[in-house]
Image (cartoon, rainbow, N blue to C red):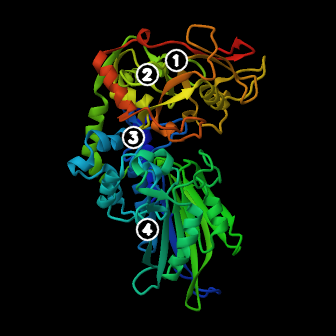
Amino acid sequence: MTSSSGASRRQVLAVAAAAATAPLIAGAPARAAGAKGPKTWDLTILGTSDTHGNVYNWDYYKDAEYDDSKHNDIGIAKLATLVNQIRAERRGRATLVLDSGDTIQGTPLATYYAKQEPITATGATHPMANAMNILKYDAVTLGNHEFNYGLPLLAKWIKQLGFPALAANAVNEATGKPAYLPYVIKEVRLGGHGAPKLKVGILGLTNPGVAIWDKSNVEGKLIFADMVETAARWVPVMRARGADVVIVSAHGGDSGTSSYGPELPNENPCTMIAEQVPGIDAILFGHAHNEVVEKFVTNTRTGVEVLLSEPSKWGQRLTRMDFTLTRERGCWKVATKHATMLNTNTVVEDPTVLAAVRGQHSKTITYVNTVVAQSTVELSAAESRYQDTPILDFINHVQTEVVTDALAGTAYAGLPVLSIAAPFSRTAVFPAGDVRIRDVAGLYVFDNTLEAVVLTGAEVRAYLEYSAKYFTTLAVGALVDPATISDPAVPDYNYDVFSGLDYDIDISRPIGQRITRLVLPGTDTPVADGAQFVVAVNNYRRSGGGNFPGIVKTQVYNAQQEIRQLLIDWAQARGTIDPADFYVPNWKLVREGVPVF
């Protein structure tokens, strides 16, 4: 939020926080006196997901309090306030707090304690462990981004947690046994002293895409089994071991589709899990960063309605699942269940969580404000999705230079070097004058490393055709609106641009027939199908992320260098960022040969 509105906004939040001490949903541990019907008890499950290294309500890239167009707030500290209010409201009745993954990656705060001062080297407690331990989660599921920094750092973080980390389908390749705790059964008391106890089974499922996205970290060490099959294996075990209620905490979306091909188990199978696996009462899920307040899916074998909920991302929302329970012949039955969603912009941050991470937060702010270079002009990423921009060429230039230098003197030294980059951010800017680490980090927001492979001319064309599906089809003469020029089903990070060749994308033509001009740079010479090129690419894409054709092959360069750091190093070494040193317009959108812009 802007500084001009910050004070008044905080006053509003303080009032909202005071008002929120009233019960959010009235819980009833037993039927009212004189009422007919079976005695009931209640259970509440609170759920978070995809917090991605956010503790404070802070935007490290803007060096300001976080705000967006919908005035969302973020962070574990905001979530803690809501959780504490609900715990106080329920006055000790059964309330569990779960998270479904993607926790230790996503902000400069998280990156700093993985890269600049890694907890594996310093022994410091990770900021996300500091924050989550204050909140006293009952369990967290490992998300795919937990594996970004390697298994030793993940193991260190798990050891620092005061609660279990779950991933039933992450299997030790050498032993065939679960590499992490598959599930936990929590025994809770449904009310005060003397109230009956309930055993709640919590099964954690991580995303099979880890095998692609972090192949260099897990290959030969971990196998990621199908989430549906894994649930079918473990739910009966949990029931046999006394679980009265079973909750699945899954890091996978609900759509039944994958961003990769069929070579791996489904990336987003939560609806399938609910439909196919008996014995599940509810699924808390994440990964897709969507807000799904309440969804019911009927199990095809039992007819039971399974409750699903996904609490958005970054700590913007808190899922609340409420269950009413009855006891029949010594067995617990779920009589009713429903979910609601709480918005963290209604409360202030929890001061205890802020205090636990304040030093690490401050150190990160100091780091990201380090000046690395002077830019001769302002460079913006606002138009990078649909126009060739200098700021994206900056990425491609650095990647090309690093790979070219590394391959000097090798068998690949004579091949032209191309580079691929995606417009990760629509808001990134290098201001004229001081460019800071946070400006570079805001342009390259992922912790990708640089690799290179050899592609033929035919493979480059196929790759570009696949990338061009990003754009909606717009006939000649149709209005072109940059806000709607892309297919909303294709995220910006799955649209790539090449440097090193000249090409046109005709958005009036059908998908698969859009690359109407592909020539050697500065010429009219078409790229031959059999020509060979070295292509600089990030590890996510090269490992199969986005399911681009032809790119999953043996690397000719892989020095495990982080691209963001390479950009920072290049800028620091030169001291000046001048588009004249790297900007080469080489692609454009057209309709029947006429430029769109």
Between the C-alphas of marks 4 and 3, the distance is 33 Å
Q: What residue is pinned by disc 3?
A: 107
Circles 2 and 4: CB atoms closer than 8 Å: no
Q: What residue is pinned by disc 1?
A: 500
Residue at disc 1, secondary structure: loop
Please report whichever mark, 2 or 3, sits nearer to the chain's N-terminal start: 3
- At x 47%, y 65%, the residue is 168
- Amino acid carrying label 2: it is Thr
Circles 3 and 1: CB atoms closer than 8 Å: no
- At x 71%, y 73%, the residue is 303
Please report whichever mark, 4 or 3, sits nearer to the chain's N-terminal start: 3
Q: Nearer the viewer, mark 3 or mark 1?
A: 1
- Amino acid carrying label 4: it is Lys
Please report whichever mark, 1 or 2, sits nearer to the chain's N-terminal start: 2
> The C terminus appears in which quarter of the rendering?
top right
Q: Residues within 10 Å of mark 4 (few under 14, many from 20)?
A: some
Between the C-alphas of marks 4 and 1, the distance is 47 Å
- At x 65%, y 87%, the residue is 36
Residue at disc 2, secondary structure: helix
Q: Residues within 10 Å of mark 3 (few under 14, many from 20)?
A: many
Q: What residue is pinned by disc 4?
A: 177
Residue 10 falls in which quadrant of the image?
Answer: top left
Between the C-alphas of marks 3 and 1, the distance is 32 Å
- Amino acid carrying label 3: it is Thr
Q: What residue is pinned by disc 2?
A: 400
Q: Nearer the viewer, mark 4 or mark 3?
A: 4
Circles 1 and 2: CB atoms closer than 8 Å: yes
